[in-house]
Image: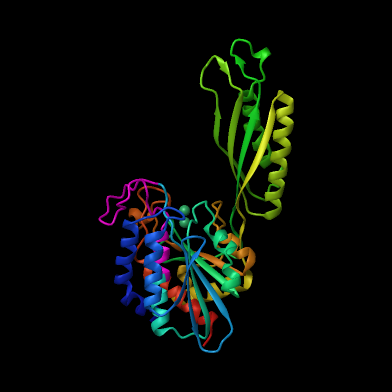
Amino acid sequence: MNPLLTALRAQAADFIALRRDIHRHPELGYQELRTSDLVAERLKQWGYQVTRGLGGTGVVGQLQRGQGNKRLGLRADMDALPIQEATGLPHASCHTGVMHACGHDGHTAMLLAAAKHLAEQGQFDGTLNLIFQPAEEGLGGAKRMMDDGLFERFPCDAIFAMHNMPGHPPGQLLLREGATMASSENITITLEGTGGHGAMPHCAADPVVAGAAIVMGLQTIVSRNVAPLHMAVITVGAFQAGQANNVIPQTATLRLSVRSLDRNVRQLLNQRISELVQASATAYGVKAQVDFQGGYPVLVNTPAETELARTVARELVGAAHVVPQTEPLTGSEDFAFMLEQVPGSYLFIGNGDASTGGHGACMVHNPNYDFDDNNIAVGSAYWVLLTERFLVA
Ligand SMILES: [Zn+2]
Ligand SMILES: [Zn+2]
C-alpha cells in the first residue's frame, strides 16, 4: 500500500468523527457559521495563515514552505441542502429540514485531514492555498469568493477539487479531461395574456394554451437545432397558471433548467429559447418576457493538470482503481467559475455502488444518502500526494 495512504489511514478516525460532527450540524449556503468557525480554528491550530469573510462564510488557509514560487489551490465546499434526513444514523442531522445530502461534510473533512498532515509532515516547496467555499448548491459561492478577490489575494497556478460519486466503488478515482459537468441556465418565462370567462375564450388571450405550445416547442430546440452529437437538456420544471376551471388566467409562468456541455451550445440554446418563446407568444396573441437568471458555466478540466491528477491517482491507489476518462455529467458545479480563471481539474471519488449498498450507494440529494467515511483516508491522501507532486520540494 502507498505509504501516504497508510499514514492518512492512521489519523482517519479523528476526521471521521469530525465529518460526523459536521454532518450532525448542517448549514445552508452562506449560513455556514459553525462549519467555517470549525475549519478556521483547525487551520490556525496547525499553523495556517487564515483569512475569513470571502464570499461571506468562505475560509482560505495558506501555508508557505521553502523558496518555491509555485502556488496551488485546493477547494472544498461546506454547504448542506434543504432536505429532511431519513437515514436514521446516529450522526444524522439535528437540524430539521437541513441535511448534508451531497457529501460536502466529507469534502470538508478530507481537505482538513490533508491540511493537518501537510502542516506536520508535508514535503513541498511553494504556497498552498486551501479554499473552503460556501454555497455550492445553486447559489454560486465560488463566484462570490472570486468577486471578493480570491485569486488576486491568493493567486494560484492551478486549482483542484473533488466530489464524491455514488454508483462507483468507494475509493475509486474518476477523472476526465475537457468538459466534465454541464452548464446550467435558470430561465423564467412570463406570459401575459388577457384573462376572461372560461366559456368565452374568443374574448380572451389564453396564456395556458400559449404556454403549453411553448413547452412542446422548446423540446424541438434539442431535437432540431442542437447538433445530434452534442447534448442539451431543456426541462420545464414549473408551469404555473390559473386557479379555477372556468377562468382563463391573465398570466402564466414557466421555469426552466437548461443544461449543455459546450459554451457554443449554451449560447445557441439561449438564443433559440428567446426566439421560439417570442414567436409562439405572437402566434397565440400573448406577450412574453424571458428572464435569464444566470447559472453555472460548463466545467472544463484542462489537459496538463488532469494528466498530473491521473498520475497522482494511479500512484496512490493503482491503475485498477482509476478511471482515466470518465463520462461527463449533466449536473452542474460552481467550481466551473474557478476553472474559467485558473487551469485545473475536478475529479470524482466513488462513494459506493450496488455491491456495497447502504447509504453510500444512495444518490446524492436523496434523504437516505450518506458520505462514505472510508473515503476520508483515500481523499486526503490524494490531496497530500497532489500537493507534493505539484509543489515539488
Ligand atoms: Zn449537490
Ligand atoms: Zn455537491
The segment highlighted magenta reads 83-111
Q: In the figure, residue 280 lies in which quadrant?
A: top right
Residue 229 seen in the current view = no
User: Given the current orientation, which residue lies at the most extreme top position?
Assistant: 199
User: Residue at left 40%, top 56%?
Assistant: 353
Q: Say if 272 sits above or below 295 in the image.
A: above
Viewer-closest of 377 and 76: 76
Q: Examine the structure image and report whether residue 143 is included in the region drawn in magenta.
A: no
- Please count the marks in the image: 0
Along the line of sight, the residue nearer the viewer: 24 or 107? 24
User: Where does residue 212 sit, x and y in percent of width and height?
Assistant: 62, 27
Residue 32 placement: quadrant: bottom left
Q: Residue at x 50, y 56 (%)?
A: 136
Q: Is residue 105 magenta?
A: yes
Look at the image and name its color scheme: rainbow
SS majority, magenta: loop
Q: Relative to residue 181, is residue 272 drawn left or right?
A: right
How far across and how far down the image is residue 326, in percent?
54, 61
**Residue nearest the observer in this picture, 187 or 361:** 187
Is residue 30 positioned above or below 287 on the image? below
The answer to whether residue 69 is above or below residue 281 is below
Residue 96 in the image: state x and y as whole percent. 33, 46
Q: Along the horizontal axis of the image, is 235 left or right of 4?
A: right
